[in-house]
Amino acid sequence: MPKQHDLKCSTRFFQDVWDRLKTFEIRKDDREFNTGDTLLLREYSLHGGFSNRVIICKVGYKIKHNDFREGIKPGYCVLGLIDNLNVEDFKLF
């Protein structure tokens, strides 16, 4: 069963995902991410906190440390992002 993950994303990387220049996320693999899961990427800066921008996308592909030991640190994964939906003026209910 696919899950939804609510994640902070620093402004520097968030903007590149927003502009569709960055189509992946490198994350600590502590949430049992799987293909088909939905990511709610919330723009966050240390100085300003959360903004009102969110990207809703799906995990289309996942590579774990065991899949590529030479390139991925133990405990981390690379998630391929698909179906991005950019949302301005996002409010949590």
Image: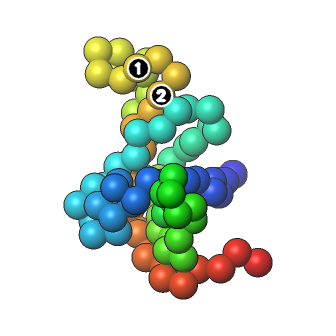
Q: How crowded is mark 2: few (under 14 residues within 10 Å), some or many (20 or more)?
A: some
Q: What residue type is labelled 2?
A: Tyr
Asked if residue 85 is positioned above or below residue 44 in the image, the reply reads below
Q: Which amino acid does label 1 sit on?
A: Lys
What secondary structure is marked by label 1?
loop
- Residue 16 image label: none
Q: Is 13 displayed left or right of 52 in the figure?
A: left
Asked if residue 76 is positioned above or below residue 42 in the image, the reply reads above
Q: Is 46 displayed left or right of 86 in the figure?
A: right
Q: Which residue is drawn at 52% across and 63% down?
A: 48
Q: Please, which residue is most extreme toward the right here?
A: 93
Q: How crowded is mark 1: few (under 14 residues within 10 Å), some or many (20 or more)?
A: few
Q: Please, which residue is most extreme toward the front here?
A: 47
Residue 83 in view:
yes
Residue 8 percent coordinates (x, y)? 55, 54
- Residue 76 image label: 2
- The foreground one among 90 and 39 is 90
Residue 93 percent coordinates (x, y)? 76, 78
Q: How far apart are marks 1 and 2 (CA)?
A: 6 Å
What secondary structure is marked by label 2?
strand
Residue 34 percent coordinates (x, y)? 55, 43
Instruction: Say which residue label 1 marks.
Output: 73
Whether pointer 1 and pointer 2 mark residues with C-beta atoms closer than 8 Å, the reply is yes
Q: In which quarter of the image is residue 92?
A: bottom right
Q: Quadrant of residue 52?
A: bottom right
Residue 89 percent coordinates (x, y)? 54, 84
Q: Residue at x 63, y 54 (%)?
A: 5
User: Tag count in the figure?
Assistant: 2
Q: Residue at x 44, y 75 (%)?
A: 85
- The foreground one among 48 and 78 is 48
Q: Please, which residue is most extreme toward the left here?
A: 21
